[in-house]
Amino acid sequence: MEDCFNGKHKLVDIYTARHSWDESHEIVRWCPICGAIVVDVEYDGRVKPGDTMTMKFPETFKEKFEEHKKRESEMSTCSKCGVKTPFVMTLDNWAIIDGEDYCRNCQKKHKVGWYEPKTLDDEN
């Protein structure tokens, strides 16, 4: 979803209409990740993005985008080393363990979160 927030959608062609009078094509494209839809026009190998219909987004994406923008300015602080990082950068790299935030380096150092040693009991 992060790519979609930055305008880099993974658009899939779902419908094409060919116009015989000028050899142009109207192509409906959809992003399966966020649900955005757009209708582009292609003529002579050139694309006019959103020429027929500009990109439209579902309400759920708009809500998540607003939340993302709001959280983007917030900072997270590692409970162990004190490093500060924008909240959006912590989603995949940080862990919350017993109410404390751990950055990736502290997870390695303290062997917690992503770096917690596995035991034989964990595999069953």
Image: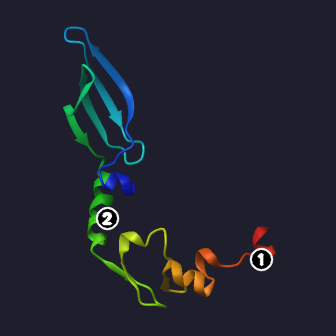
What's under tag 2, amino acid-wise?
Answer: His
Secondary structure at numbered mark 1: loop
- Mark 1, residue position: 119
Q: How is the image coloured?
A: rainbow
Residue 25 place in picture, x, y as percent: 27, 20
Residue 28 place in picture, x, y as percent: 31, 29
Is residue 10 positioned above or below 5 on the image?
above
- Mark 2, residue position: 68
> The C terminus lies in which quarter of the figure?
bottom right
Residue toward you, 106 or 31:
106
Residue in the picture at 25% in, 42% down: 56
Residue toward you, 53 or 9:
9
Residue in the picture at 70% in, 78% down: 117
Residue 96 visible to an observer of this rendering = no
Where residue 45 sits, quadrant-wise, is: top left
Marks 2 and 1, how far apart at CA: 37 Å
In the drawing, does residue 47 fall left or right of residue 124? left
Is residue 92 positioned above or below 42 on the image?
below
Is residue 68 positioned above or below 105 on the image?
above
In the drawing, does residue 102 fall left or right of residue 19? right
